[in-house]
Amino acid sequence: MISSLVLVVEDDEEIAALLEKYLARAGYRTTKASTGLTALTHVQRLQPDLILLDIGLPDIDGFDLLTKVRGNSTVPVIFLSAMDDSTDKLLGLKLGADDYVTKPFNPQEVVARVGAVLKRTKGIAGSEVIRHDAIEVQLDSHLAIASTEKGRIELPLTATEFRLLVCLISSPFKTFERTSLLDACLPESDALDRTIDTHIANLRRKLTESGQDGYITTVRGIGYRFARSTGV
Ligand code: CA
């Protein structure tokens, strides 16, 4: 099996070299980009399995880059945030990142996060298909599909959003607490309950954009429930 390719987007040469060294030691293939432009080219040409993305780049803001990447790719993204700034973290997750690491970081922790996110992305075993009403998830091929009047549409979900959807759709009508969703979907993060809200908001928006309204119900003070709204 070919090892996963990690794209390191970082303009600080020392940090980039350190990350590449530790990733290589853990058995990953790596490639590097020190500008946003190079990163975009690499994403298209090399189709990395995961991106480590520095927010402070010389030519383009990391958040803008993330938006561009998300325009046509669901590749997992872990962003490197310079400050311990929760606004940064929430914005990154809102834009579709799968996880974040705060600088200064322990490279071994970054490698662990990479492993966890890749496992989430690829590690769901079985060829099972789970359906609820017009929504279908194919665990094997990692696809989420909505049946609409115009046919079947693939939902452009990030790895974390997919994982959340699998969790919710596996037990329709069940109310999940935020903490249990956090444990199931973001086990390696020191994430806040609010980050789940952000991922849920993204998932809900993508469902809505595919014409599938009202599947995710917010249960006040507790968490979320997935089931087709009866319109009542
Ligand atoms: Ca930087």
Image (cartoon, rainbow, N blue to C red):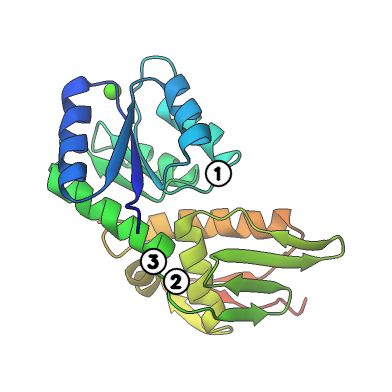
Instruction: Pick out the residue farthest to the right.
Output: 149
Distance from Cα at disc 3 to Cα at disc 1: 20 Å
Numbered label attached to residue 73:
1
Distance from Cα at disc 1 to Cα at disc 2: 34 Å
Residue type marked 2 = Gly
Measured along the vertical axis of the image, is residue 117 above or below residue 147?
above
Q: Nearer the viewer, residue 132 or 193?
A: 132
Q: Earlier in the sequence, mark 1 or mark 2?
A: 1
Residue type marked 3 = Cys
What residue lies at 43% left-to-right and 22% top-to-bottom? 38
Q: Tell me: is circle 1 under 8 Å from ligand 1.
A: no
Measured along the vertical axis of the image, is residue 194 above or below residue 141?
above
Numbered label attached to residue 221:
2
Callout in the foreground (1, 2) = 1
Q: Image quadrant for the N terminus?
A: bottom left
Q: Secondary structure at mark 1?
A: loop
Numbered label attached to residue 1:
none
- Rendering coords of residue 225 (x, y %): 55, 76
Q: Could you say which quadrant of the image residue 86 lies in?
A: top left
- In the drawing, does residue 23 fall left or right of residue 64? left
Residue type marked 1 = Ser
Residue carrying label 3: 185
Circle 2/circle 3 CB separation < 8 Å: no
Callout in the foreground (2, 3) = 3
The quadrant of the picture showing ligand 1 is: top left
Q: Nearer the viewer, residue 58 or 37?
A: 37
Q: Earlier in the sequence, mark 2 or mark 3?
A: 3
What residue lies at 71% left-to-right and 76% top-to-bottom? 229
- In the drawing, does residue 196 fall left or right of residue 3? right
What residue lies at 53% left-to-right and 81% top-to-bottom? 170
Distance from Cα at disc 2 to Cα at disc 3: 20 Å
How many other residues sit within 10 Å of disc 2, few (<14), some (14-19) or many (≥20)? few
